[in-house]
Amino acid sequence: MEPINTADVAAFKEGGASMANLMIENSGIRVGNERRRGRGAGINPSGRYEPISRHVFDDGWDSLEELPPFKTEVQVERPRSIITRNSSPDISFDRSINPYRGCEHGCIYCFARPTHAYMGMSPGLDFEAKLFAKPDAPRLLERELGKKGYVPRTIAIGTNTDPYQPIEKTWRIMRQLLEVLEAHDHPVGIVTKSALVTRDIDILSRMAAKGLVKVALSVTTLDRRLARTMEPRTSAPPRRLEAMRKLHEAGIPVSVMVAPVIPGLNDHEMERILDSARAAGAREAGYVILRLPLEVSPLFKDWLLRNYPDRYRHVLSLVRSMRGGKDYDAEWGKRMKGAGPYAWQIGRRFEMAARRLGLNQRKQSLRTDLFVPLHGEARQLELL
């Protein structure tokens, strides 16, 4: 356990928070370095739906027990359906699949962290270490694609938690989903931070030849130290760029996501990231401004204070300048890009760099006219 020190207090005060807020946000539950080695979050607060919260503190009697390091645990989840629908007006897809709940990548900024509260777990370290796999996902997908009246549109995978996080090497749920989608000639868009995506080039290249797949690699920074601190179990930036090159050479459409753009921390890298991605084969690009919904805000603040205390006040000031003075604004149309002069500047920089590099000259639409709803026995049963 790491006590809250005076430097922390001073930094929080500079950032506009009171000592009371500091105690609420940290609550004495900052986890020691040895226990969370290789993890992104430094705290593990109780989920917001829990009736009680646990606060650990040193009573001065040296009675704190030595706890073991956080190890990745995977439980099986048995959902009734696998395709999630949405009607959000500011995103380009209306359906998605999440093979896993929680993500071992440990990205401190991940906007999906608050979903772990629905499982009675912490959006902090629990989100990175206590994961849920959905091995029934391929079977459920087969069933849902075969429903009478199903209308095909691009399914997005990787928009919440990464389908190619480390446990995919063992569970292989993503590969099985691709096998189902290929069998049905169904379009899919993939977003990942992992070079593991190249494992499935055989399937992806066949689908790409029919205009059925696009892959986006998210590149947050080219700085190895920042990447390892901010997103500890993702593929290193050079490996992501190499994955882009391999996908491009296999004929698979590749794009780059500069996401999230964190003002005062990685926003100065935007042009370098786009330039490197273009050289690796990316032909489309996008960006998203840092989002800090619900529990993500105190988690990110704690991380920033531990790793970049000298930038704490500056980064939060810029974030709030793009969010109407708040840590986050969930309004549609603003949540992805922000608002205000600094957000406008980032947007113009992105547009100018993309234009200079020839990115986004032609947006490729995936085909839906090839969709085959049923195969084999299922098709024969329908005839009967």
Image: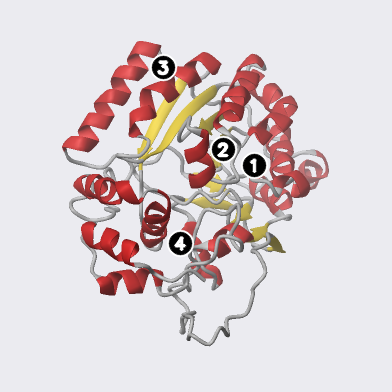
**Residue placed most toward the observer, 298 or 217:** 298
Q: Quadrant of residue 350?
A: top left
Query: How busy is the neighbourhood of tag 2: few (under 14 within 10 Å), some, or many (20 plus)?
Result: many
Would you name the residue on which mark 1 appears?
164
Would you name the residue on which mark 2 appears?
192
Would you name the residue on which mark 4 appears?
114
Would you name the residue on which mark 3 appears?
359
Query: How busy is the neighbourhood of tag 3: few (under 14 within 10 Å), some, or many (20 plus)?
Result: many
Q: Quadrant of residue 340?
A: top left
Q: Which SS class for mark 4?
A: helix
* Residue 300 in the image, given as x and y percentages of width and height: 40, 55
How far apart marks 2 and 4 lie (CA) works out to 20 Å
Q: Give the amino acid at mark 4.
A: Pro
Mark 2 or 4, nearer chain start: 4
Mark 2 or 1, nearer chain start: 1
**Residue placed most toward the observer, 154 or 2:** 2
**Does the image show residue 369?**
no
* Residue 148 in the image, given as x and y percentages of width and height: 63, 47
Q: Which SS class for mark 1?
A: loop
Left or right of 373? Residue 273 is left
Residue contact between numbered discs 4 and 1, judged by CB atoms under 8 Å = no
Residue contact between numbered discs 2 and 1, judged by CB atoms under 8 Å = yes
Query: How busy is the neighbourhood of tag 1: few (under 14 within 10 Å), some, or many (20 plus)?
Result: many
